[in-house]
Amino acid sequence: MSDAPAQNVSYVDTYQPPTLSGAPAPSAMPPMPASPSATTAPSTSTPSAQPPSESLEDQNIFELLGVTQATDQEKEAFLDELQQVIWEDFLENDVELLLTAEEVAQLRQLMGNTSQDELAQQEAIVVFLEKLIPDLEEIMLEKALELKSDMVKERVAGMREYFATQPEKLTQISQAENMMQEDKWQSAAQNLNALS
């Protein structure tokens, strides 16, 4: 896998999230203390209330990564950076597959317009792409979910390395991996967060 040319490397393989304040992490991922999910909605008092969602889409990225000691500003900056990584990867790797050569040329012209500030330029690009790609929002969501999944898998790899000499913890990590394969992301996060 390391023999692949640089342009074929996925952004999820090269992206390193910023380290947030708190305890040092066993890998490049943020710290992993246990904490109840801050985004889980309280259940209603009706007997037919649904259990919390296990889907990846419904999980808080900070809970999945075990980050509970970051400030709101650090979390916001982290989310902004993730969004920018996804956007840049889309422009570099996906847009040419979805547009004609003429449309790509128009897009490059918009991207090269230095008379606008960065935010105005990005808004113009989004408006342009939304006209040409009706499911742009869905594509971006899929890319975000892919990155979210890969970041959790990176966390698991780091934890495996950190707990390499502790078989009972490695068993718990394997259980969390099985939960992830079964799309039980909330349970997997709780399992991983209990290890710290």
Image (spheres, rainbow, N blue to C red):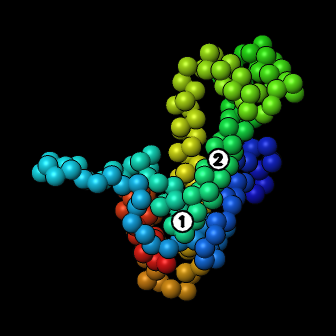
Horizontal side, residue 177 vs residue 30: left or right: left
- Up the image or down, 131 lies above or below 188; here it is above
The answer to whether one can see residue 25 in this image is yes
Circles 2, 1 touching at the beta carbon (< 8 Å): no
Q: Mark 2 is on which residue type?
A: Asp
Instruction: Look at mark 1 in the image and give the residue it sits on.
Output: 67
Foreground of the two, 23 or 167: 23
Locate the N terminus by quadrant: bottom right
Question: What percent of the width, then of the height, locates residue 42?
Answer: 29, 54
Query: Quick check: 53 left or right of 145?
Result: left
Which amino acid type corresponds to the residue marked 1 in the rendered image? Val
Q: Nearer the viewer, residue 161 or 61?
A: 61
Residue plotted at (49% across, 60% down): 64
Q: Which residue is mark 2?
A: 80
Q: Residue at x 75, y 44 (%)?
A: 8
Residue drawn at x 14%, y 49% is: 46
Instruction: Between residue 140 and residue 162, name the one nearer to us.
Output: 140
Q: Residues within 10 Å of mark 2 (few under 14, many from 20)?
A: few
Q: Earlier in the sequence, mark 2 or mark 1?
A: 1
Position of residue 69 in the picture relative to residue 35 (left or right): right
Q: Say few, some or many: other residues with alpha carbon within 10 Å of mark 1 (under 14 / 14 to 19 / 20 or more).
A: many
- Horizontal and vertical percent position of residue 101: 77, 16
Q: Is residue 19 left or right of residue 66?
A: right
Decide: is 94 above or below 129. below
Please identify the quarter of the rendering in which residue 38 is found: bottom left
For mark 2, give the secondary structure. helix
Identify the residue at image location x=43%, y=69%. 35
